[in-house]
Image (cartoon, rainbow, N blue to C red):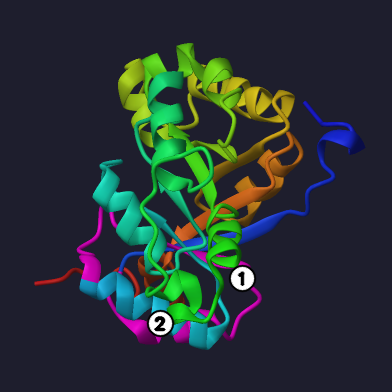
Amino acid sequence: MTRSSSETDRPVQAGTFIKTVSPHVVEILGTTALDFGVLDAEHAPFDRTSLDLMMLAGRAARLPLYVRIPDFEPATILSTLDLGAAGIVVPHVDTAEQAALIVSRARYQGGVRGFSSSPRAAGYGTMSYQQAQEAGDQSLVLCQIESVEGLANVESIAAVPGVSGLFVGRADLSLSMGEQGSRSPAVLEATARIVRAALDAGKIAAMFVGNAAERDEFAAQGVTWFVIGSDQSLLRQGAQSVAVGAGRPRG
């Protein structure tokens, strides 16, 4: 289903997951036309020290970096945003109550985020108290919908004030639904419902896709924030495309 122009006024943005703990990856991606990167602290071996290093590279490369956090504990959200993340992608958000709690932990005004003027997010003390809070409260909070329970509550999650958007997690959603893949008719129908919920609430519709063809497919439905593949898949695809012995067995 193609969306009307009023539903697609947001510019389409594309980034990729970064799963390799290397500032050089960020530096290289910063030379491309990608809009952002997402450090995958849920499924890749990032700790606070490595996230800090990657954020430093992001600032140098002028590439905004988001973080898919491993949980939504207060310390996790606080440290991630203090390091200078442009926002957080929060996995396994199943209820509006969880979404409200996440927003509260990510916000100064009306929330419970602890304040310090010393971290990167506050310009190492160069921003005023008000400036630092205003800048911090602009961070995106994307709730990942990837379970039957989350799908059942998707409209109420989207309606939570402070939730910036919904991120479709088709792989885990497929598992939760007992389906055999992210392109099964039931999963695609669920994806459309999540996208619709985000758009109806005036929020960002976001998702992971494997390639540019899927990006274009879902952009027609109103999705405007895409994570396409990862540094790992881009490296593998690039290497495979020039390999002379493509398809040879590894021994």
The quadrant in which the C terminus is found is bottom left
Q: Residues within 10 Å of mark 1 (few under 14, many from 20)?
A: some
Q: Quadrant of residue 49?
A: bottom left
Q: Is residue 138 magenta?
A: no
Depth-wise, is mark 2 or mark 1 nearer the camera? 2
Q: Position of residue 116 (x, y in %)?
A: 38, 65
The quadrant in which the N terminus is found is top right
122, above or below 86, in the image: below
Q: Does the image show residue 183?
A: yes
In the rendered structure, find residue 127 and report the number of the disc placed on it.
none
Q: Quadrant of residue 131?
A: bottom right
Q: Quadrant of residue 92?
A: top left
Disc 1 marks which amino acid?
Answer: Leu
Distance from disc 2 to disc 1, alpha carbons, whole Å, reads 18 Å
Residue position for label 2: 56
Q: Which region of the structure is painted magenta?
A: 20-48
15, above or below 244, in the image: above
Q: Position of residue 225 (x, y in %)?
A: 63, 50
Q: Position of residue 108 (x, y in %)?
A: 48, 48
Q: Earlier in the sequence, mark 2 or mark 1?
A: 1
What residue do we see at 50% from left, 88% from top? 60
Residue position for label 1: 34
Q: Secondary structure at mark 1?
A: loop
Q: Position of residue 20 (x, y in %)?
A: 29, 72
* Residue 118 vs residue 158, the one in the foreground: 118
* Residue 170 vs residue 5, the one in the foreground: 5
Disc 2 marks which amino acid?
Answer: Leu
